[in-house]
Image (spheres, coloured by chain):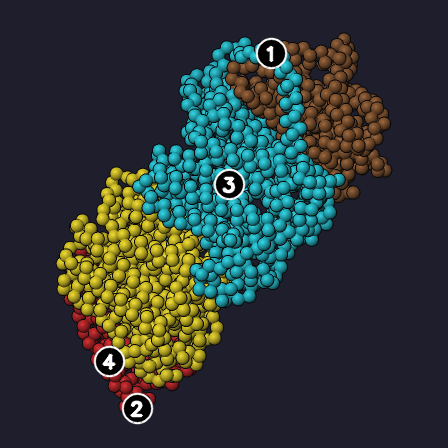
Amino acid sequence: MTAGLAVQINSVLAALILLTSFGLLVQRRIYGMLRLFAWQGAFLSLSTAIVGYTAGLHHLYISAALTLALKVFALPYILYVLIHRLEIKRDVEELVNIPTTMLIGIALVIFSYYLTAPIRELSTLITRSTLAVALATVMIGLLIMITRRKAVTQIIGFLALENGLFFAATSATYGMPLVVELGVALDILIAAFIFGIFFYHIRTSFDSLELKDMEKLKEDE
Amino acid sequence: MLILVLLGINLLAAAVLAVIGEKRYAPEVNILGSAATFVASVFLAADVYYNGRMISGREYFFVDEFNVYLAVLTAFVSMTTAVFSRPYMRHEQERGRLGKVAMRFYHAMFQLFIFAMLMALLTNNVGILWISMELATLSTVLLVSLYRTPSSVEAAWKYFILCGVGIALALFGTVLLYFAAEKVLGEGSKALQWTNLAAVSGSLEPTVLSLAFVFFMVGYGTKVGLVPLHNWLPDAHAEGPTPISAVLSGLLLNIALYALVRCKTLVDGATHGNRAGQIMMAFGLVSLLVSAFSLLRQKDIKRMFSYSSIEHMGIATYAFGLGGSVATFGALLHMLVHSLTKSAIFFTVGHASQMHGTQEISRIRGLIKGNPLVGWGLMLGVAAIIGLPPFGLFTSEFLILTATMKSAPLLAPFFLLGLAIAFAALLRKVMPMVFGAVPDYQHNQRVSHTPVILHMILVLVLGLYLPVFLSQWLHGAVRLLR
Amino acid sequence: MTLPTPLAVAFFTALIFIIMAVVSPLLASRQASLIRIAFFFSVVACIMGLYAGFSVVLSGQAETLTLPIGLPDLPFYLRLDALSGFFFTITSLLGLFVSVYSFGYVKGLLDRRPVTSFVVFYNLFMAGMLLVLMADDAYFFMISWELMTVSSFFLVCFEDESLEARRAAFIYLLIAHVGAMTILLAFGILAGFAAGFESFRGFTFEAMRTASIPRSWASIAFVLAFFGFAAKAGVIPMHVWLPEAHPAAPSNVSALMSGVMLKVAIYGIVRLAFDIFPITAWWWGGLVLCLGLVSAVMGILYALMQVDLKRLLAYSSVENVGIIMISLGLAMLFKFHNLNLLAALALTASLYHCLNHALFKGLLFMGAGAILHSTHERNMERMGGLIHRMPQTALVFLAGCLAVSALPPFNGFVSEWLAFQAFLQSSVLPGQVLKLLSPLGAALLALAAAMSARCFVKVYGVVFLGRWRGQGQCQAQETGLAMRAGMWLAAGACLALGVFPTLVIGWMDTVTNELTGAGLKASAQAYGWLWLTPVSAARASYSGPLVFAVIAVVILAAYLVFHSRKGVVRRSAVWDCGYPGLTNRMQYNSTSFAMPLRRIFGSLLIIKETVRPCDVTRPAAFQERFTYEVKVLDRVWYIFYKPLTQAVFWIARHATRLQNGRIQIYLMYSLITLIVLLVFS
Amino acid sequence: MRIVYSLIIEAAQIAVVLAVAPAFVGWVRMLKCRAQGRASAGILQPYRDLRRLFYKDVVLAGNASWIFRSAPYVAFGATVLAGAIIPVISTDLPLGLTADVIALVAVFAIARFFTALAGMDIGTAFGGMGSSREMMVASLAEPAMLMSVFTISLVAGSTTLSEMVRVITSGQFVFRPSMALALMAFVLIGIAETGRIPVDNPATHLELTMIHEAMVLEYSGRHLALIEWAGMIKLFLFASLGVALFVPWGIGGPHEVFMVPVAVVSLAIKLGIVGVCLVLVETRLAKMRIFQVPEFLGVAFILATLGMLSFFMLE
């Protein structure tokens, strides 16, 4: 595989990651979101592996494997089981005005592109142009969390945000040092564990996973 | 070696307590673990004091003037908190608010949390710092919802999500930092080491670093509790068990600020300007003002003091942003005395709310007559926290205010406004609580005297006299941060 | 054997108080002996302080000392010079009298509650005041200053069940603290321009003295510091805490707060304006003068309207601080124009009034405490005829009233006389504004003095004279020996200072020499101790001893002459105008006495007058009884403070909207913050 | 030797003040009777009144304390001290240095302070009312008086009365606007301070009109005599103070013993004229309502302040 081809594949993967982000932004069904999230993880893993291959950095394979294991299999599975157990699979989420959300998402992409422009100039890596996509994915992840109204979907948004981070790590720098990567993965695993517990707590405390029930703690008017 | 021992104690204690945490003697084990950590930290500090900075553990750990005093502080406050938590948590258990599993979980997580904080302080690696910060968050998230009440679950959820997002953004900042550093220092862990980064900060790429700083600012800033990223903080402090509020307020915020300040020095070195400082000043001032005004409307005693923490973190952030040796010295001192004072306040608040069976300010009355130690402890603690001498917070605020007048006089009125409002608000709420007659629903109980008295004496002494070693460290830290 | 230096004595004085504060809780179980021990040491310490202050003023030699605590590079600097010595004397002198008085007074408090915390904070309060006077660097100054504030805060809310006391203490501490912060900012400016700011050396007064400060910054610093000190001194419009705090505090504390603590604030202004940095604009003096005038006139006007004795005294303190400020402002104007001798004259007037006010207001508050102690009453409308029950208190209180009304031969007159002399010299000042200001100032000062006499005729007449207005029979008893002793000492001092002003002015010559480079000693004592001739005999002269002697001789002569015929003195009922059944309630009381002035100056006050018929079933024209109520409110409160608090709460209401409970909104804050920061970096 | 002369003159002056004051009051009353077409009791009637009062017994109110009994003596003593200070016949007064004009005003204030207290002492509505009104008048008149004398002191460069008189007599007479304003103010104040119509009516005992009289209503016998005498001296002193300040010519200087008879004569003439003027004012005007008095005194205060201002601004 030549460097040029790798760049092209990588760009396509970046585009796909961005696309899945947008998909997550507008998807109403939970299972649909879960599937999209798994796809995003797969693209991320693939991209990491390709970068590792072209740059000859073998620790990136470990990253890719971790991503694959965590983001494509473990997390979606955990979420699937939770959704199944908590009997919320059929819930359809009402979203705030989808076209507006999309427009904001696009604006965020443009903004990310604009922001990373000077950095792109500095970088010599083949993956440099994908930094904008990474940043956009992070921001769209945040946007997903803002627009969602259920605890589970908010978590999916959060995980999408982290995908963006991973993508940034590989695309901007060919991956962080291994210790860090492992630590981050561990943290995400713990986080997944914790939100799993949380869903049960929320469920038992509020009889639903709607965020609107959790708006009691505020300053009195 | 010492560092590894120091960190190992906590991990060991956490592991042990995970097994025996519900036993009658578990609180004592908890105290023992924390005390051992404190002793180790004192040895570490002595080592640093006599032999200077050190780097160890294959360059994964380092100790300099900046983190050594915070490490000792962290170990100390966690020890006193452990002492305080013994009667407090027992009382909670007797009241039936907590079961055995919860106690086990509490004790183990307490130690893990301390471990995470010490790790964050002592690590030389920006990435590991990030991991430790995340660990600190994750270990306390479930402590906040320990009581399983709907509001505590809600608070914990908000804490988890907001800090999770925040810390994720900090990771993005770390990635950017690595991106810039890798060009100068080459690939691998070396490029994420504070010691190396500080040495080459002048040659790092300024645009990348200023971008990275924004992410650090929003990320760690969330953890520091800066307005408008602070919204998790009052909820989490108010709903968790009081010992956890004490360490969250007294220690975790400090650690986050520590991380932020470390990043700021790098960015300053790279950009040769004070852009980062200005951002921090803005955040600090806004935090100070908003929290001061919010303080006026509080009805829950722990919530009120958590706003006070936001206020003080705002002050410290502002002072670090201001720069200059006087302000930085003030900010460093502020972190120290604020920790001591705020945790002492939370100790008394914990007892006070147990005595009245509520956290509502309007129901807590007549503390001085009911229990002089709790009453006077709260009164003097508040006197200290609102910046009255001869307590240490006055010293730091004195330095920060005078430095403001020197470097940014136009901000002085706002700063003063914030301080004055916070002063008025806290005083107004606290006076009816401590003074007056004892209400009939108040019931006295066993309280732990030592932590409150110890903290207040330290705060008092620090207001009048800084020991030589401390002033050396603070001066050293000031030099580091310049 | 050499005597210890005054500074060492002064330092040990403060140390005794601090040690007593620390030791007192140990004696908590034995309250009676705690009081005896604590106030015994307090008396001893005050005597030591008196020696230190007196001797340092006498010699005029400044001394310095450095304590090895404090910030790393900023140990506590102590300095005792003539100015601090003078205020040290005031503090110790009144402290001595009040401490003697407290033996009895605090024992009275013991009936209701333990006094351990009182004793602790009383000692800290004294220590705080003394340390402020000795401080020679900004940090130590602020610490002592706030120590004084905080301890007096706890003393004010000593009766902590009372909502009123807590509210008073709150307002007091808030205003005092904001004031302290502005003082701190002023020090910040000075230190910023002084050499060695970064190494903390700039915080010493020594460094500030040598700093070269741009004119505009100097003015800002002065205004900030003046605001802070004036807030503490109770200058209008920052006086609102004073009429709340003084009534709420125990009377011996009121005496100290009013008598000494306000003076410590004055000390701050004098120290700053005359010592630490040069007066660089004429309007500084003008500002001080104008606020002094407003305080003097409005203070006494409000005092007249009060029915609460201690509240009245508090407002009278506002007036007297105003008078001190007037002379101080004049002194600053003279100093600015390099008229050093005149500056010395005005400054002497100011400082002398500080001393006098400390003594007579201390005396009056002690008297009010004695009355409170024996009648449990602060409302003058329910007093009367106490002269028959408490003859000695009545006598010493009369001395206080005469002194505060500026009547010779008491001390209050001397200082006001000096102030007038300073005004009459102000024609030499250049500038049209000043020329307009000084006659107006003299006029208002005269008005304040005259109204103060009126006010204290009311006080004395209503409280001690006439017949008991309260419920039932008057149960009041003469107070105990200790309290009387304290008051007698203060009254004696008031008379002595009024009769021998020449000696006092000669003694305090070093103070003006130090601050203005000129002294009055030579001219004032030109005619010996009998005559006080501040500038020259041709200009003005006053002889306290002779005034005292001549009046006494004439009274004696008249008495001897007219009592040669041993006429029968008959007692009989008063004339009732033919309507029998005069009751005690028909006497003139405080409200009715103040009525004419309430009408004349009504527009300056907020007066709420309500007349309600007692019997609502009858038509208004056929009512037999009415209830009448009049409330006089402080307009300043409604102009400044009420809108301010409302604005603060308004902002607070809106600021807390940030926290609306929705996590999505919180996340949005994060996103927006991120975007804004990214855009701007 | 000089000091002996001075002491003699001082004694003479006090004697003159004590002796002549009732005569001056008698003169005013006589003129007033003539002006109102009544028969007068003669110039010596005040002496007879005083003697009668001194021989009467004292009746004290049941509630009266020592303040009530001592107030007449203090008032008398203070007034006499004032008489020793004001240069009535000579400026060569050893006691003149004791108190200057400011102290003089304060000395009068002492007398008033004690009489007002005495009014409150008996515990009736009348006494209190009198004290309250008296103090109201005083508290407005006193600053005006100070302002008025300040103007003269500024002109003379001194506040010592003898010195002021000496400077004004020795200097060239120039018309000064400030002095004219001060004089006008002084006249108004003098009327108010001595309790004459239109501010107060010395001859009334109607509750609505009384000020001074209400205050001393309960006095009798020698106490009343002393109060009355002090009142007469006060009127006399105000007249001579006005004379001394505004038309000082004729007053003897230092050790000009021969001037004393001249001074006495010129004083008699001047006071005679003052009496005439006073009577004219009193018969032409009606007594004011009590709450018009502040306006009256306000005018005086403004005039005096204007006088001082005009000195600062114009001279």
| In front of the other: A28 or A134 | A134
Provide the residue designation for mark 2: A2
**Element marked by disc 2:** loop
Q: Percent x, y for residue D264?
A: 81, 23
Mark pair 1, 3: CA separation: 45 Å
Q: Can residue C549 be seen in this view?
A: yes
Judge left or right: residue B281 versus residue D163. Answer: left
Q: Is residue B468 above or below residue D39?
A: below
Q: Can residue B125 be seen in this view?
A: no
At label 3, counting other C-alpha atoms closer than 10 Å, the crowd grade (few under 14, some 14-19, many 20 or more) is many
Provide the residue designation for mark 1: C567
Disc with the residue nearer the chain's start (2 vs 4): 2
Q: Which chain, by letter, is yellow?
A: B
Q: Do the residues labelled 2 and 1 touch (CB within 8 Å)?
A: no
Q: Which chain, by letter, is brown?
A: D
**Amino acid type, residue under disc 2 in the picture:** Thr
Q: What residue occupies the far bottom of the structure in this picture? A: A2
At label 2, counting other C-alpha atoms closer than 10 Å, the crowd grade (few under 14, some 14-19, many 20 or more) is few
Callouts 4 and 1 on one subunit: no
Q: Do the residues labelled 3 and 2 touch (CB within 8 Å)?
A: no
Q: Percent x, y for residue A195?
A: 22, 64
**Amino acid type, residue under disc 3 in the picture:** Leu
Q: Of the numbered discs in the image, which one, if any, rests on residue A64?
A: 4
Mark pair 2, 4: CA separation: 20 Å
Q: Mark 1 lies on which chain?
A: C
Q: Mark 4 lies on which chain?
A: A
**Element marked by disc 4:** helix
**Element marked by disc 3:** helix
Mark pair 4, 3: CA separation: 83 Å
Judge left or right: residue B36 versus residue C274. Answer: left
Q: Mark 2 lies on which chain?
A: A
Q: Colour of chain A?
A: red
